[in-house]
Image (cartoon, coloured by chain):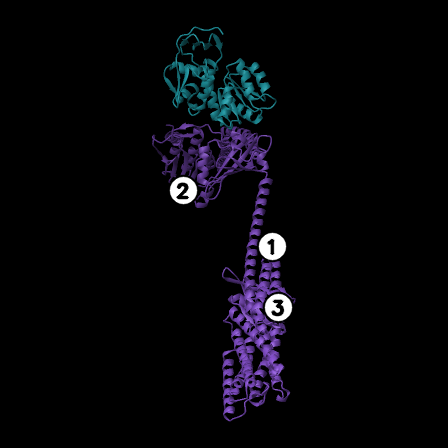
Amino acid sequence: MKIMIVDDEAAIREALGRKLMRENFQVVLCKDGLEALRMFHVERPDLVILDIVMPDGMDGLTVCRRIREMSDTPILMLSANAVTEDDIIQGLNAGADEYLTKPVRLNEFVARIQALLRRATIAVVELEQHYNDGFLNVDLHRRHVYVNGRKIHLTPTEFKLLAVLMENAGRVVNQRDLLEQVWGKEYIDDVYYPRVYISQLRRKIERDPGNPAYVLTEHRIGYRFEKQPQTVPKAN
Amino acid sequence: MSSENALTLIVNGLTLALSLSFLIILFWYDARREITHFFAAFLSLVILWNLGSLLAQSLALIGPLSATVLIPLFILELGFTGSSVALYALIAAQVKLFTRRFRLLVLLALALLVIYRIVLYASGAPAPFAVDETGSLRMQERGPLLLFYLVFNGASLYLIWRFQRKIRVRLLMLGLVLFIIGQSIGFLNPQLQTFALTTMLCSASALLIGLGVIQQEIINPLSDRKSAVEALRQVITSTANQSDIDPILSELARQSAALLEADGAAIFLRDEGQLTLRTTYELPTEHELPTRPLSHGVAGAVATSGQIIQLDDYARDWRGQSDFSFARTFFGSVVCAPLVAGGDPIGAMLVVASRQGKLFDREDTYLLQLLAAQAAVAITQSRLFSEQTQLTEQIVQSRNQLETIVASTESPVIAVDRSFRLLIANPAAQALFPAGSPPAHDAVIADLLPASAFPANLRRAFREIRRAHALTYEATVGERIFLCHVASLGQQRMEGWVAVLNDITQLKELDRLKSEMVRMTSHDLKNPLQAAMANLDLLREDVYDSAGADVQHSIDVVDRQLQRMNRIIRGILDLERVREGTLTLSPCEPAQIVRDAIADLNEYAREHGISLTATASDDLPTVYCDQEQFKRALVNLIENAIKFTAADGRVEVSATQQGPEILFTVSDTGVGMSAEVQERIFDRFFRGKQRGVEHVSGSGLGLSLVKAVATNHSGRVWAESQEGKGTRFFITLPCAPVIS
C-alpha cells in the first residue's frame, strides 16, 4: 500500500512517514500542493493524507478537489485549522473521506488510515443489488450510479453510505449503526460525518436536494432510503 | 374805668376764648391724652384768674367797694397761684417727669401751701390782691404768693432748662417762658401798676401754650404722619425696585434716620448665631467689628428678644455692652426696633440721635416699627428673590452643563417619550438619522432608525426594562455597531426612555482581531505540537521498553505536558468559538440533553470510580438552545465534578423546572471550594488550589466556557459549595415560549 503525505511541516510529514513505514506502508512525502498533484500522477498512491493550510497558493482543499476530479482515492485531511464543525464539513465537502485535527496520536492515526483503506478496498463487492426507478439507477456491484440517465461519480465513502442505506431500504438506519457500518467502529461518535455525507449524497442523487425523496432524515434517530415509483427518464 | 383796663379785659377775654377753643379742639381730637388734661387744668385756672379779675374790676366799677369784692379777689388769687402750679404740672407732663412719686410730692407741696395760706388768712393777714375804684388791680401783698411763685415757677423754669430737648415746639417753649415772665412782672412793686400787664401777658402765653400744644399734639403728628407715609412709600418703592439686599438696607437706614430726624442709623442682621452690621448711615464704622455675638449691645438685645427698645440717654440708660465703641460718648436718644420675619427676629434697626440731638418719642418708635416691618419684608423678599435667582441660575447652569455634556459627547444620546416620539437627540445621534434636515421634535423614533437599531425581541426588552430599569443590547446602524444602554425616564411614573449608544464597532473589530489572533496562534501552536507528539510517539516505540526508569519517566512527563498543552489550546479555541456567540438554536428536550451529556461521560466516570446518575423528567418544557454548545457546557460541568470527586463518590445531574426556566444541577460529593475560589471559578484560566486535588489537570477554561454558553443562551450559572462536602453547580435556560 502506498500512502502520500502532504504537509508543509517537514517534522510532521517525516514523523508520520516513519510511523507508516514501520507499519509496512510505502510512503511518498510532499511539501506542498503542486508537488502533491504531480506526485499523485506519478505515484498513484492508495491513500492521501492532506494538510489544509499550505503555502504557495494551493491549499489542501484545492488539492483535494483536484484529486477528486480524477480519482476516488481515499483522502484523509489532517489539519490544525479545524475550529468549528463547519471547517470539518468544508473539508468533507471538498471530497475528503476523513478529517482529523492536529495533534493526533500516531496509533490513532494509523488506526484511522487502516479503517479508511478497509472501507475503500472491501467496498461492497459482496452486495448484489440493483436499483432502477427510471430517474435513479444504481448498480452496487459495478459501483455505477446514473441519475436521470447520466453517470455520476461517488466517492468510496459516499458509495458505501448509499449502499448501506439501500440495503436497508424502507427501514431507518440509526446514526451509530451507520457510522459503524460505513466508517468503522472508531468513528462511532463522529456524528457529523453522516450529516455531511448525506447532504453530499443528496446533492448528487436527489431531484431537489432541499426536499429529498430518496434519502430521508428521521429526526434524532437516523436516515432511511425510500424507493420511488417508476418514472420515464427525461432527456436533459 | 380806664380805657387801658377795658382794653385789657377785651384782649384777655378774646385770648382766653381762643385758648378755650384750642382746648375744645384738643379734647375733640383726643380726650385721653395726659397733656390735654393738664393743659385743660392750666387753662381753667388761667380763666379763673381772669374771671376773678373781671369780677373784681366790675364790682369796683359798679359801686363802692364792699366786702363782696373779696370773693372775686379770692378767685383771682386761686387762679393766679393755681396756674403756677398747673403750669408746673403741665411742663412736668410734657417732659414726662410726672411719675407717681413726683405726683405725691406735688400734692404734698400743694397741701402744705394751702394750709400755709389758710393759716395766713386766719391770722388776718391782708388779701394779696386789691382793687381800687378805677378798677385797677394790684398785688398789694406779695408775701403769701411769693412762696408759690418761687417754688413752682422756679421748678418750672428748671424743668424747661433741664428738659429743653423734650419741648420741641418753639411756640410752646415761648408760651411757657412768657407765662413765667408774665407772672414775675406781677411781683414787681405794686406802685408800678403792672398787674394788668401780667394778666395780659399770661393770657397771651396761655394762647401761645394752647397753640403750641395743638401744634405738638395735632399738627406735627399729622404732618409727621404725612412725611412718614411719604417716607414709607419711598422705602417701599426703593425696596421694590431693588433685588440686591445691600442697597435696600442702606436706603432703609437713610430713610429711617431722615424720617425720625435722627443723626445716624444702623441695621444689624442675625446670621448663624451672630449679629452682623450690614449697613450704617452717618456713623463711622471703620473701627467697628462687622460681626459680634448675638447678645451684643442694644441691637443684640432687640434682635434676640424681638422687643423694641427706646432709650433717652444711651450712656445713662444702657447697662450692657456698647453697640459701637463711640456709642457712650456720642449717642443720646436711641430707638432700636426688631426686624421680624415669619415671627422670628432676623435683625435690628438702630436709630440714634447725638447727645444734643432729638429725643425720640412714642411717635418715633411707632414710625421706626413701621419702617422695621417694611425692612423685614424687604429683606425677606430680597432673600427669597436672591435664593430664587440663585436657584434659577443653578438650574439654568446645570441644564446648560447637561446640554453641553449631552451635545459634546461622542456617544449618541436619544430620549423618547412614552409614544416613542423624539425628545432629545444630540448631534451624534442626529448623525445616525437619515440625511437631511434635523428631525422634527416629535418624530417617531422608528422612522429615524433602522430596525437593526432596536432590540430583536421588543416584548422581552420591555420586560427587562421594567424589571431591572435598564437594558443593554447591541444595536446596528449602518456599518456601525453600538452597545445601547436604555433606561427609563421619570422618577415616579414612566415618562419615556433614554438610550446612550456606545460605538463598539472598533471594539468589535478588535475583539474579532483578537479572536483571530488567538485562533491563529493556537493553530500555529498545533503544528509544533503535532510534530512533537508524533516524534515522542516514535521515540516511545523505539526506546521506552528498553530504557531505564528515568528515561521512561521523562518520556511520560513530556507526554503529559504535551497533552496538557493540547488541552489548553483546545480550551482556548472552544471558548473563542462559544464567545463568538453564533448559536444554532433548535428546540431541545432538557432530559435528552442530560442523557446525551451523561452518555459521553459514563466511561470516564467509571474509570474514576464515580457513580454518575441523572434525574430529568421527560415532561419538562422544551428549551431553545444550541444543543452542541449546551451539551458541551453540561459535559464540562460533569467532567469537572468527576475530576474533583474522590473514588466512590457520587455525581448527580438533574433538570427541573423553576418558573420560566429549566434549572440544570450538577452536584458532587467532592472536595468543595472556598468562598474565594467560588468567586473566581468562572474566570478564564483560573484554577482553584484545593487541597488534595493538586494532581487534577485542567486548562482553567472549562468553566469559562460554561459561563459563556449560559450567557449566550440568556441563562445564568452559579455554584454553591462547602469545602470537604461537595459542590453544586447550577445553570439555567429559559423555557421556549409555548405556542398555543
Secondary structure, mark 1, is helix
Q: How many marks?
A: 3
Chain A appears in which tint? Answer: cyan
For the question of whether residue A111 can be seen, the reply is: yes
Label 1 lies in what chain?
A: B
Q: What whole-number distance in Å separates the C-alpha atoms at marks 1 and 3?
A: 25 Å
Secondary structure, mark 3, is loop
How packed mark 2 is, by other alpha carbons closer than 10 Å (few <14, some 14-19, many 20 or more), is some
Which three-letter amino acid code belongs to the residue tagged 1?
Asn
For the question of whether residue B324 can be seen, the reply is: no
Say if B228 sits above or below B728 in the image.
below
Which three-letter amino acid code belongs to the residue tagged 2?
Glu
Q: Note the chain letter of the purple one.
A: B
Q: What x and y, as percent, mark residue B289? A: 61, 66
Looking at the image, tell me whether mark 2 or mark 3 is earlier in sequence order: 3
Label 2 lies in what chain?
A: B
